Image (tube, rainbow, N blue to C red):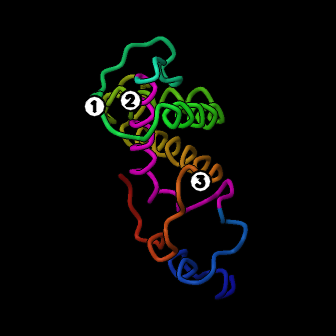
Amino acid sequence: MTTEHSQSWCLMGQADAPPSVLFGETEPDLWPYRIRTIALLRRYARASVEVGRLPSLLGREFFRSRVTSYSMGSFEDIVIFVADMELTIEELDTSQKKLLAMHVLEERNFPDIARLLGCSERTADRIVNDAIDKLSQHLLIRGMLERLPEGTRGCQGGKN
């Protein structure tokens, strides 16, 4: 293996990333967006209720959530936001939607999710974060989530 190929991702993160890793299927730097994506999902849940709809992630299920009032502008802005989020969420597969609903909207923790799915907590953590990352990717592509500055997406390694 050449020295060029043996460089760590951290070193590559300090230079220009190769085009193959920029918001492709193997995007390694989506984890910094998790908190913002979760915040958008919670805002979507509240906004859906405000416009008289149940969030599409939930179908007809009941969920426990703290619904608070916030200002987003006009009613039309809220309706547009809800419609845009629904279109973005529809790009996920059914299992990803269910995982996001359990973790973000129903506020279940990883031990709960692991028990419900019959897997380890580590696996539950990984698949939930993968679903959040996938949604983040779609939100970035649609322009609903702003890209972070390059310096903040380095190889700090982390999760929410």
Density class for disc 1 (Cα within 10 Å; few <14, some 14-19, many ≥20) is few
Nearer the observer, 144 or 64: 144
Query: What kind of residue is marked 1?
Result: Thr
Residue identifier under label 1: 68
Q: CA distance from mark 2 to mark 3?
A: 21 Å
Q: Answer few, some or many: residues within 10 Å of disc 3's Cα (few below 14, many 20 plus, some between 14 and 19).
A: some
What element does badge 1 sit on? loop
Question: Could you tell me residue 158's position as x and y percent?
Answer: 38, 61
Residue 120: image quadrant is: top left
Name the residue at 58% across, 82% down: 7
Image coordinates for residue 105, horizontal then vertical, percent: 38, 29
Residue drawn at 56 percent across, 49 percent down: 144
**Magenta stretch bounds:** 23-49
Amino acid type, label 3: Leu
Q: Earlier in the sequence, mark 2 or mark 1?
A: 2
**Magenta run includes residue 133:** no
Between the residue at mark 2 and the residue at mark 1, the CA separation in whole angstroms equals 7 Å
Q: Which mark is residue 115?
A: none
* Mark 2 lies on residue: 46
Task: Give residue 140's mark.
Answer: 3
Specify which label sits upstream in the sequence, 2 or 3: 2
Q: Look at the numbered discs 2 and 3 and tell me whether their residues touch, using CB distance below 8 Å.
A: no
Name the residue: 55% across, 74% down: 9
Of the 4 image quadrants, the one containing the N terminus is bottom right
| Placement of 7 over or under 108, stated as above or below | below
Mark 3 / mark 1, whichever is N-terminal: 1
Tell me the element at label 2. Answer: helix
Decide which of 87, 32 is in the foreground and name it: 87
Residue at the far top: name it. Answer: 60
Do tag 2 and tag 1 residues touch (Cβ < 8 Å)?
yes
